[in-house]
Image (cartoon, rainbow, N blue to C red):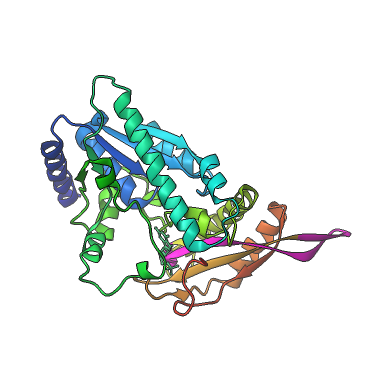
């Protein structure tokens, strides 16, 4: 609309003025905030922006390809995709403890990002490397880190999200979404041409599937979880609640699958199976500080469980998490 069009023009002018002829680097995660920031900054300065997309091997099914398709394919932005999954999975081997896993993933992310930033500088190509680091920081993040709000869940779980990266890299910050609330960021994303499904995605934690595989992370577990979770999300998107006309994906705040590294007995045909268990988690919340488990229709749960057990060999039992927050947390780790 007209208001958003004006906003984009102003934001673009501000970014151009701030950046001048310098180079900008941005960590693209596939999440809403970094995606909208990337699209806006790309609109303003085109190839002066380089996005770095680190695949830590703990992303959802086909997520890496979708991010590349959107940003490199459709927007024609410069995007470097770094496949660091062996590095991350290697370091996580033998480490079952949730906070330790978060620290490992956070630290490796910074290392990989730094190495890419330095490679870019060394590559020459007429430029001296990035002098700006762009981040998709939004207004609620600014307020929270100012300490004016009540104590955040950060004290219970360390939400790494690339803290301290600009200082470590010696870069200036470019944060064009700093004044916007989440709904405004989403409207901006749509106005910039990002697809509705990308802009209205549920939040996904920085450590990704690393905290949705209980205990030790293994590639085998991640592969099973990705396939099960894709089925759950696909069915949530397809199931329309007749009362509201909305999909159950849009009626929930966050939904995902958790991998339990335990085996239970099942039966298939004439044979016995001894396979893994997954839990479906789906919550409704306004602030993620408290949350209710979502009362999904039984028919939907039935379809999801049937499909996962039939389609994902290696999983023979599906459970639904009926715990609210508090005392449970939204994630299982
Ligand atoms: P919990 O599990 O604490 O989750 O009830 C609240 C919200 O925070 C997200 N979450 C994280 N996000 N890094 C993140 O970026 C993390 O380590 C992390 N842990 C939890 C969770 O997905 C939910 O939206």
Q: Percent x, y for residue 6?
A: 13, 46
Q: Going by the image, does 130 lie left or right of 69?
A: left
Q: Is residue 243 above or below residue 250?
A: below
The part of the chain drawn in magenta is: 250-274
Q: Going by the image, does 68 lie left or right of 168?
A: right
Image quadrant assignment for residue 117:
top left
- Taking the magenta stretch, the answer to whether it contains residue 271 is yes
Q: Going by the image, does 56 lie left or right of 223?
A: left
Residue drawn at point x = 41 percent, y = 49 percent: 107
Residue furthest bottom in the image: 327
Q: Percent x, y for residue 18?
A: 12, 39
Q: Main secondary structure of the magenta part?
A: strand
- Taking the magenta stretch, the answer to whether it contains residue 9 is no
Q: Is residue 95 above or below residue 301?
A: above
Residue drawn at point x = 19 percent, y = 50 percent: 4
Residue drawn at point x = 29 percent, y = 48 percent: 189
Residue drawn at point x = 55 percent, y = 51 percent: 92
Q: Is residue 153 above or below residue 159?
A: below
Residues 9 and 177: in front is: 177
Q: Percent x, y for residue 15?
A: 16, 40
């Amino acid at each position: 609309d007209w208001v958003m069009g004006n906003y984009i023009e102003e934001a673009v002018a501000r970014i151009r003025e701030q950046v001048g002829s310098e180079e900008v680097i941005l960590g693209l995660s596939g999440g809403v905030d970094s995606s909208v920031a990337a699209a806006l900054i790309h609109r303003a300065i085109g190839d002066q922006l380089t996005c770095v997309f680190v695949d830590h091997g703990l992303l959802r099914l086909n997520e890496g390809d979708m991010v590349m398709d959107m940003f490199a394919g459709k927007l024609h932005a410069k995007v470097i995709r770094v496949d660091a999954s062996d590095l991350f999975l290697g370091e996580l081997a033998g480490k079952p403890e949730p906070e330790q896993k978060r620290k490992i993933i956070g630290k490796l992310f910074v290392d990989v990002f730094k190495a890419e930033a330095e490679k870019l500088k060394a590559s020459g190509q007429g430029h001296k490397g990035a002098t700006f680091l762009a981040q998709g920081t939004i207004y609620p993040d600014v307020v929270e880190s100012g300490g004016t709000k009540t104590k955040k869940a950060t004290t219970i779980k360390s939400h790494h999200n690339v803290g301290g990266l600009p200082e470590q890299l010696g870069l200036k910050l470019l944060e064009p979404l700093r004044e916007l609330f989440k709904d405004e960021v989403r409207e901006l994303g749509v106005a910039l041409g990002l697809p509705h499904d990308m802009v209205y995605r549920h939040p996904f934690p920085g450590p990704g599937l690393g905290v949705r595989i209980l205990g030790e992370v293994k590639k085998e577990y991640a592969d099973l979880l990705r396939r099960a979770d894709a089925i759950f999300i696909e069915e949530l998107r397809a199931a329309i609640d007749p009362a509201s006309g909305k999909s159950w994906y849009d009626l929930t705040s966050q939904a995902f699958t958790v991998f339990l590294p335990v085996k239970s007995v099942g039966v298939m045909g004439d044979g016995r199976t001894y396979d893994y268990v997954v839990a479906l988690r789906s919550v409704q919340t306004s602030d993620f500080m408290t949350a209710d488990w979502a009362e999904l229709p039984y028919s939907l749960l039935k379809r999801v469980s049937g499909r996962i057990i039939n389609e994902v060999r290696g999983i023979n039992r599906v459970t639904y998490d009926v715990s609210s927050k508090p005392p449970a947390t939204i994630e299982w780790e």
